[in-house]
Amino acid sequence: MKNDIKVMKRAADNIRILSVAAVEKAKSGHPGGAMGGADFINVLYSEYLTYDPKNPHWIGRDRFFLDPGHMAPMLYSQLCLCGKYSLNELANLRQWGSPTTGHPEFEIARGIENTSGPLGQGHTYAVGAAIAAKFLAARTGNPTFSKETIYAYISDGGIQEEISQGAARIASNLGLDNLIMFYDSNDIQLSTETSVVMNENTAEKYRALGWHVSEINGHDVEQIRQAIEEAQKVKGKPSLIIGKCVMGKGALKEDGTSYEASCKTHGAPLGGGAYVNTIKNLGADPDNPFVIFDEVKEIYAQREAELAAICAERYAEEETWAKANAEKAEQLKEWFSGKAPQVDWSGVEQKAGSATRAASATCLSILAEQVPNMICASADLSNSDKTDGFLKKTQSITRDDFSGAFFQAGVAELTMACCCIGMALHGGVIPACGTFFVFSDYMKPAIRMAALMQLPVKFIWTHDAFRVGEDGPTHEPVEQEAQIRLMEKLHNHAGKPSMLVMRPADADETTVAWQMAMENTSTPTALILSRQNIEKLPEGTDYQQARKGAYIIGESDENPDVICVASGSEVSTLQSGAELLRKEGIKVRIVSVPSEGLFREQSLEYQQSIVPQGAKVFGMTAGLPVNLQAFLIGADPKSMIWGLNSFGFSAPYKVLDEKLGYTAENVYNQVKKIL
């Protein structure tokens, strides 16, 4: 039902008042954008967005992804009108313990579909969610996913971020007609007018990329309605609604003149007389601004009743489908349960001495067969990062067929990662994505957000060290492992390491790493894998001990004279060196450390049983020495770590092993110095 225009304007002003008042009370925040976007978000939530107020986790709901997280006051105020936040919570914006954080943080029960802040990422999550909805519709046949619409909200800053190009390309290439994005085009950003930094015709750019584009007055209720309804009817294309909005709509300065379209309202409270005049201008009491007007309460109560009827019809439709597809319905419940999938790993047969990227491909082929809700992606490297192990058992997702489970992202690592985050946010899908480890640099902003939101995205990074060889230092990761392992040390808000990082030592340890990745439902997982072949660890190695982060491999000596520690391919180098040392009667213990972060979560007793206090320790890492330096704490003073302190070099990898000291002979020589 369409509401009276006057009441709709009153509701939008209510959002403006609440936003401005919350920022003013917090003495911090961004009021201007919230005031500009109020009309669109009010129309969307009061008349179009389909969700169940009583069941926020309903799988068939429409989803709203906010890109400019600094516009949190607008979203909180809107959700306050919907009953998701109290006025008191809104009045405690940005305060310790308050749910109204400075930027929105993922909480479905509150109506927050994504954590947002770093511009450009939020709307790219929406692209991933739209892919997930199409995929689930194709895989299950449940009609609810075909009726689901993904809405995104983007600002000038999000358009300027480079990731918007990748998101636009992918959405268009896949024909995501279930995606509708509103662009709040207000010509103002934090420090300048947008004309200072951009002169593009954004509408024509998106049309050229294959989007349906409409251009409207972002404050005109009827134009907003028409644009949404038009976008809902579009087939084969995503839709962009460009709304010309006014930053600080309705704001007045202390002297009573207009404060609209000013950079000053973007990122600071209006302050003093400007605040008082603005609240009065919008029809509220500056001394009592945290109020929902009666007529606004009425339209949202009415919308709640409408939604109850809509949801009842949709639930009935879902139930009819479930009765006709009992097995799929049970499967779908599992997919949205957040539980780890059941995988029979007994069929995995790893080839001894293979590269860990090849071992990963073997695991991925099993997962493609046994985990029907898994989507694997690659940034144009599937035959090199060996995600083609998954691809060979399925097919690529295309605009005409979403029944495949391989997402071809193209050369766009950050966009790919954010799309995978969006799939995880949507729910029902287990996303994984692969590229070269050195290109994880492009993905760091997304990795951090996945960790912050505690999303179980699987990151597959191959070509893990200088042994990339002939490609040279541009493609040889050195410092990347140290950077990623910091995420093991950084704890999330649940008090756990924010990421599981595994660098397996051989093919069989890779199988365990993949088992752990699939069992990990509460954080992202990184798998760091070799390009080159790696010798199999000695007989007697209990690979399941890798679950403790570090463990003693087979054939290690009792009462060792030295303990050698490493991860990845360096473990086999240590083993080769140990053979030389043992010929002289030197007792050697070799410890594989696929995840030091996980190892440090074990009991102190276990840690001491692996590397006792005072032991002579030799560590070897193809990355920076800091990767293993924690093992020197409490060790014999002569202990040392052999690592790489410079960028890599261009040469065949075996030559680099010799030149850089990653040989059995150098292990022998360095350990002899320690002893």
Image (spheres, grey):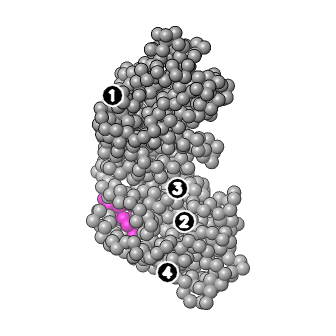
Residue that numbered label 3 is attached to: 114
Based on the picture, tell me whether residue 239 belongs to the magenta stretch: yes
Q: Nearer the viewer, residue 488 or 187?
A: 488
Disc marking residue 292: none
CA gap, disc 2 to disc 4?
17 Å
Which tag is nearer the camera, tag 1 or tag 3?
1
Residue 346: percent from the left, percent from the top? 44, 22
Tell me the kind of residue under disc 4.
Ala
Q: Give the residues drawn in magenta, as a range.
A: 231-241
Residue that numbered label 2 is attached to: 70
Residues under numbered marks 1 and 4 in contact, where contact means CB atoms less than 8 Å apart? no
Judged from this view, the residue extending furthest toward the front is: 673
Judged from this view, the residue extending furthest toward the right is: 287
Tell me the kind of residue under disc 3.
Asn
Tell me the kind of residue under disc 1.
Lys
Disc marking residue 654: 1
Quick one: SS at disc 1? helix
Residue 234: percent from the left, percent from the top? 33, 64
Residue 215: percent from the left, percent from the top? 37, 74
Q: Residue at x 50, y 62 (%)?
A: 66
CA gap, disc 3 to disc 2?
13 Å
Q: How many marks?
A: 4
The answer to whether residue 319 is seen in the rendering is no
Left or right: where 532 falls relative to 673: left
Left or right: where 654 falls relative to 330: left
Which tag is nearer the camera, tag 3 or tag 2?
2
Residues under numbered marks 3 and 2 in contact, where contact means CB atoms less than 8 Å apart? no
Which tag is nearer the camera, tag 1 or tag 2?
1
Sequence-earlier tag: 3 or 4: 3
